[in-house]
Image: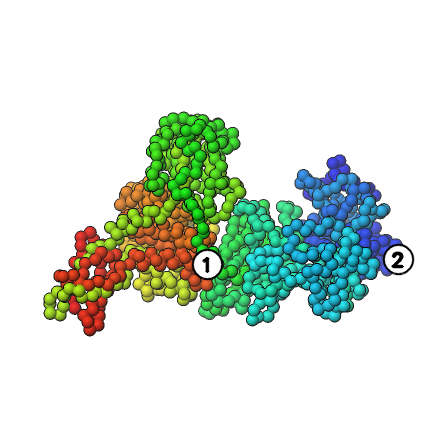
Amino acid sequence: MSKFTRKIKDLGNPLHIFQGWRSSSRVPGHGAEDNRKSSMMDSSKDLITNPTFVWGSDHGWQPLCCTLSICDTPPLCGPPPSGHQFYCVAHSRTQAWQGIAQDLSGKLKAGVEYSVEACVSIRGPSDYSDVQATLKTEGADGHVSYITLASGKASKDKWTVLKGKLSMTTSAAKVLIYLEGPPKGIDLLASYFSVLPLGAEPECASKVEEQEDLARNILVNPTFDNGLQGWSGLCCKLAHSGAHGWKGVYGPRGASFAIATDRREGWQGIEQDVTALVHANTKYAVSAVVQTSGLSHDGADITASLRLEIANSNPQYVTIGRVKASSTEWVRLEGQFHLESGYQRAVFYLEGPPCGADLLVGSVTMKPVNSPHSEGQAARKQANATVGPSPSDILKNSSFAYGLQNWNVNGCKGSVCQSMENPKVSPYSGKSFVVLSQRTDSWSGMGQITTDRIELETMYDVVAIVRVSGPNSDVRATLNVQEADNSNRYVTLGSVQANNQEWKQLQGKLILLKAPKKASVYLEGPSTGTDLLVDSFSITPAQGTVCPGPPFIEDPKFGINIIENSNLLEGLKGWYAQGSTRLSIAPGAPTLVPPTAAASLPYHDRLSGSCIIASNRTQWWEGPAQTITDKLQLFVPYQVAAWVRVQRQRGKTGPQKVNIALGIDGKWVTGGEIEADDQSWKETVGSFRLEKKPDNAIVYAQGPEPGVDIMIAGLQIFAADRSARFATLRSRTDKIRKREVVLKLTGGNRQPLPPNIHVRVQQTTRSFPLGSCINRWSLDNSSYVKFFLENFNWAVFENEIKWGWTEPERGKFNYKDADEMLQFCLRHNIPMRGHCIFWEAEHCNQGWLKTLSSLELSEAVQNRGVDLLSRYQGKFLHYDVNNEMLHGSFFRDRLGPDIWAHMFKLAHQFDPQARLFVNDYHVEDGEDGNSSPEKYLAQIQGLLKQGASVGGIGVQGHVETPVGPILCDAFDKLSSINIPIWLTEVDVGSTNEYIRADDLEVILREGFAHPGVEGMMLWGFWEGAASRENGHLVDSTKRVNAAGQRLIALREEWTTSFTAPTNESGQLVFRGFLGDYDAFVDLGQGEVPLHFKVPKGYDPLVVNLYL
């Protein structure tokens, strides 16, 4: 049913509507309305703020998804009958319900009768149109009602007055009154809109009625109860009203107030030094109650501002908020600001009325905005979002306080709204948001040209608050750089999965390394027809990384199981059931500690052989649980292991996933997952670490379908001493990465050198591949290039040969970036991996591929393989053929089960020298039952049987909390088929760079010490160019952080360099890492340089060197 044809139901509605509404016409110039006009103009009692629009459209009024303008040029229907020259126009209306609205929540009082009047007209192609006044109420239970108060024919030739009455019998939580009705394309005009009490109100009404909430306020003397303490005049006199008002003016609720008087400039007012009260990188909300006095004017802007004084620089000024104020009433000014670092002094002040007018201030509060609780909550609760005006924001009008000024709207229609009704949307911050509708393509959106505002080699934080009105969609912030040759480069700065239920925060990074001809940033992403909503979009300089040092961990209690009664010797003590589950104990479980746990524990006892059975499960998440909140320490790596099994599948076939889960303040974290069956016990492994103190933490088993019983035994959660394995790893490394070398040094006389001749040996290159991904964008950064060349000897292109990059649109190719990167690597003799020819994940394939028929897609696959492999034949030593086949089935679903093997055969045909890899994630950490080592091996063996030339196993290495025995166990299993393993995309992440360094050391040592691993690649190292948040090794300020220093230290440890004398036979014997070497022989007349290689081998290498 249309909301314009709904029936009015008095029963159960908090409003009783008096009948007798009528519409009447008024001819301009007649005096029949004089009495009404004088009554309507009693603004001191009018519940409508700014009833005649003399203070503009942003004071009290809000557009209902259209645009409001204030005009003073008489329309076709004549001058406004209110006696003022101003009237409001609601235009750009695309729906009949869009119009002019005002929030009356808390203003209508039970038992009071009100008269309602509105004077309206229309403008557009129609001569007449229905206009109606509507009341929307929302109860405390969330129930919403719409009541049509009146409707009448409005004309574009004359003003029409709507009249009526209403009264409240009970209170409503929210009340909105608005004008609506004309069809789309017809402008709605209003000269006034008034709601006045007909009799005496039970209590005095005021524009600012509520008691000021001072909780968490940081300002000194916010309500002037202590005179003017803390406040001073800004180049003017400051006075206090006292308890009895000032010049007939009384403060809000009769309280005292401050007066800034003797003002000779508009910027003069009242100020308070807040330097010691505020903190950098914090968001604050400001609220002030203000009025003016002393000068006749219809209204003047009052502005709240912040003055930041910076060393050796001019002060910066931040506008927090503004409001239209007059001498007739108190009004509230509200706004927010995010304080950046780098200032020496911060001063808050109020300013604004014309010179000669006094500024009256009833109260001022400043409060820090709440911090977020958990991911998945509405973005409105995310205080870490940097929104609101910032003095260093390179985007102008980032919160749309001035509509779409400074913004470019491309391929769609942009409008500013203060609210939406279906679905209901309110701003995240501020008073409005932008709606980008009628979008013609995924790139349709909004942006700004920023060419002259971005400083080179400066890292910026990118933050946008977005949502969509349609299906869940990716929203991207994109940088478009136009080079001197007019070519364009597009860089994704950040993205977020947006929905139509809540605001989401998009976060990203931006850095510009060389001056472009033109640079612009914009928001894009959702599919055609999906509206994109934007609350704010800001880009501000990133704060420099300040690390407090390694976290202090007094006693991590390594190896001690934090699970109470793990062996079930005390029955079910410490355990409880999730949901409707019933718990019982049964025998028949393993008595050995799970192997990966045993490998980490210095000592361990046998298990009891008992297990918990969780039966009567009606939900997949139900199972046995324990609370462990007080047993966890921050920054300590915890290892998880357990024996699991299922039983009583009740007609259900196949294995069931069992997950050891952690509930951390309502957020789910996996502690390991395995596919279990009812035939045997399986070990599940995992690990985790907390970096924020939880209020509540539980561990529980979950996963199988309802009706399937979970069996769990020997659950272990203990702090893992990861460095305890390093001595063993060094010993293994020595055996597999080094070789014994005998240097036989012969002099010019063809005789061996005498003993005690000093020889300096220096390894110049390392045979073991240790590389990183690179991207074309970062190669413009000379510091980035320097660090890469000094620390890595292999490269993989992050995105530039992916199909979505080389052919984003069908038939439109881009190999320019890949060609330039290829030449860079060839110049520096850097071997390259090709990542990737195809990608099996649905969301990683271009939209145009998804529209193809099976025949067309098969042809596109063939063309892709031939084009890429022919172009770069012999250049890439490796190829990831079809990325992440354990986690996707895009091509297989469309082209059948043989397509995967066909892709390998196609790659081998057109580049027979390249080693072809499978490549997947979570194989090495136990987190995902879909990608266990066993499943990976089964997939590889299946491909081999189909004739696929699988020459390498790619283990990506995106590990949250690496633990040695878990990694080693995976490598052991994968190496059983004698195909080389490469860690292809290693990254680790922690807010503390020293913990990040520990993580990196664990995974690199385990890989380097395992005979099945033949190479390791990092997935980025530079802040802003590393995919994982808090995963970089070098800060954007070019500081090599603790993780970067750890990488350098490991490289030095894995490099052989020393000075030693020859032995009695004139030889030098040593054990060195594989690679190229220089030897410098000191014969007393300067060093003689020699070169030799140490290749892989098991017998001692004898090298004859002749001087």
- Residue reaching furthest to the bottom: 1085
Residue in the picture at 44% in, 60% down: 1035
> From what the image shows, is residue 688 above or below residue 610?
below
Which quarter shows the C terminus? bottom left
**Amino acid residing under circle 2:** Gly
Which quarter shows the N terminus? top right
Question: Which residue position holds label 1?
Answer: 1024
Local packing at callout 1 (Cα closer than 10 Å; few below 14, some 14-19, many 20+) is many
Residue in the picture at 81% in, 54% down: 44
Question: Which residue position holds label 2?
Answer: 31
Are dots 1 and 2 in contact, CB under 8 Å?
no
Q: How many discs appear?
A: 2
* Observer-nearest of 983 and 732: 732
Residue 572 location (% of width, % of height): 46, 29
* Observer-nearest of 71 and 852: 71
Say which quarter of the image contains residue 229.
bottom right
In three-dimensional space, the C-alpha distance between marks 1 and 2, rounded to whole angstroms, equals 70 Å
Q: Is residue 762 left or right of residue 821?
A: left
* Observer-nearest of 497 and 530: 497
Residue 627 location (% of width, % of height): 49, 37
Q: Secondary structure at mark 1?
A: loop
Residue 232 location (% of width, % of height): 70, 64
Q: Is residue 845 left or right of residue 1075?
A: right
Q: Nearer the viewer, mark 1 or mark 2?
A: 1
Q: Secondary structure at mark 2?
A: loop
Disc number at residue 282?
none
* Observer-nearest of 910 and 306: 306
Residue 736 location (% of width, % of height): 25, 51
